[in-house]
Amino acid sequence: MKKIKPRLLKGFRDFLPEDLQFRKQVFAVFEKIFQKYGYEPLETPTLEYWDILMGKYGEEEKLVYNFKDFGGRQVAMKYDLTVPTARVLAQYQDKIKLPWKRYQIQPVWRADNTQKGRFREFYQCDADCLGTDSMVADAEFITMAIEILNELGFQEFIIRINNRKILNGIAKYAGAEDKFYEIVYAVDKWEKRKPAETKDDLISRGLDEAQVDKIFSCLELMGSTSMEKLADLEKKLGEVEEGKEGIDEIRQIIELVGDEEKLKYDPTIARGLAYYTGPVWEITVIEGGVGSVAGCGRYDKLVSGFLGRDIPATGGSFGIERIIEVMKERDMKLSDEGESEKVMVANMKGYTKEAFELAGKLREQGLIVSLYPDAKKLGKQMEYADKKGFASVYIIGEDEAKENTVQIKDMETGEQEVVEL
């Protein structure tokens, strides 16, 4: 038989036990805090109908994996978790009570260029509150995000917030309402290039010099605090009602969160996806130049495409893959408090039944027990136990069986004790 070379598709990964165990620990932190804030779990399928996903992602739509299945149906692989959630809400509206808080931790797929930290199959971690237009929901999400990052061990991070209504107001102020999305896409790349490059980009998208100057005056604001910058922007936007509404919403959120060190107004945060309608924010880890680890915002119109009426919603997606990679690189450990101790029971020749029964008793006591399956030399078994990081090894041999005892070796100290079985 021809030998098949074991290999992976580019942009896809295997997770070996140690790596997967750490990932699950990180997932557990997110789930614990999501549930603490009243969010409920949701899962949606890998494939959706093509028309469910299309028209939601702006310029990034070209990255959606799509094909015809064997039944001739045009289908697409899940690109994010937000659009499927909107579909669920519309499809099961008789079963879902609003406001509805939901979270999802599931894989998504994107036909993207692979690079360090960027894959074609990866997990997203979302939490959203649907059915309320209150800024309380936005502020609560931000407070929850701060708690999650602190729990994971991050200290130096910042949440930069803006509002699509403000960007709409800026477009009106500049006399470029018909170029709103062109402005959003250009502003969204502000940090990645020089201001002159953004200016050239805006002009290439059909804006004139005077319009660009007005836009820049709203991005380069006076003031050292968020509230001072918002006050300066309010003077510029004057009577543009939508812009003033957006400013008021940001003020509400900042006041509710009450942490102006972590939460700051930034007029260059735009979020490129087409479905955002209100406050938008990004979370950036400063230490080590990690960059953005979450993108979030309000999307009050998305569900209407499925339901025929607007359902206000807000929430966001954590870059859980990037967070995990950074934690691994920095050897950031999570507390194992509350986890059961992991031990091994040795399998001595002629005493397999006794070892099997001992493993069962230890499991009844709440321990995580690995029974070595083969009755090999003890040295070989101890070498395995050391490599796997078991806390201790329980041994029953001839002497122990006669005296109804068990020998316990502490794998960290090397000390051994004999106790009654």
Image (cartoon, rainbow, N blue to C red):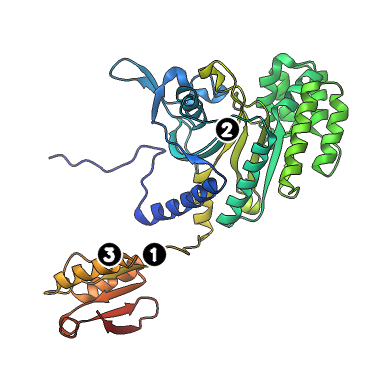
* Secondary structure of residue under mark 3: strand
Tell me if label 2 and label 1 are in contact, CB under 8 Å. no
Horizontal relation, residue 214 to residue 61: left or right = right
Point out residue 227 in the picture as x, y percentages from the top left corner. Answer: 82, 40
Report the residue marked by disc 1.
Answer: 340
* Secondary structure of residue under mark 2: loop
Residue 200 lies, with reference to residue 125, above or below; the image says above
Residue 395 lies, with reference to residue 36, above or below; the image says below
Point out residue 276 in the picture as x, y percentages from the top left corner. Answer: 63, 27
Residue 318 visible to an observer of this rendering: yes
The disc at residue 370 is 3
The C terminus, quarter of image? bottom left
Identify the residue shown where x is 35% and y is 81%: 414
Report the residue marked by disc 2.
Answer: 99
Residue type of the residue flagged with mark 2:
Pro
Residue 308 lies, with reference to residue 87, above or below; the image says above
- Badge 3: few (under 14), some or many (20 or more) residues near its Cα, within 10 Å? some
- Badge 1: few (under 14), some or many (20 or more) residues near its Cα, within 10 Å? few
Identify the residue shown where x is 66% and y is 54%: 156
Residue type of the residue flagged with mark 1:
Ser
Point out the tag, 3 or 2, that comes first from the N-terminus. Answer: 2
Q: Nearer the viewer, mark 1 or mark 3?
A: 1
Q: Nearer the viewer, mark 2 or mark 1?
A: 2
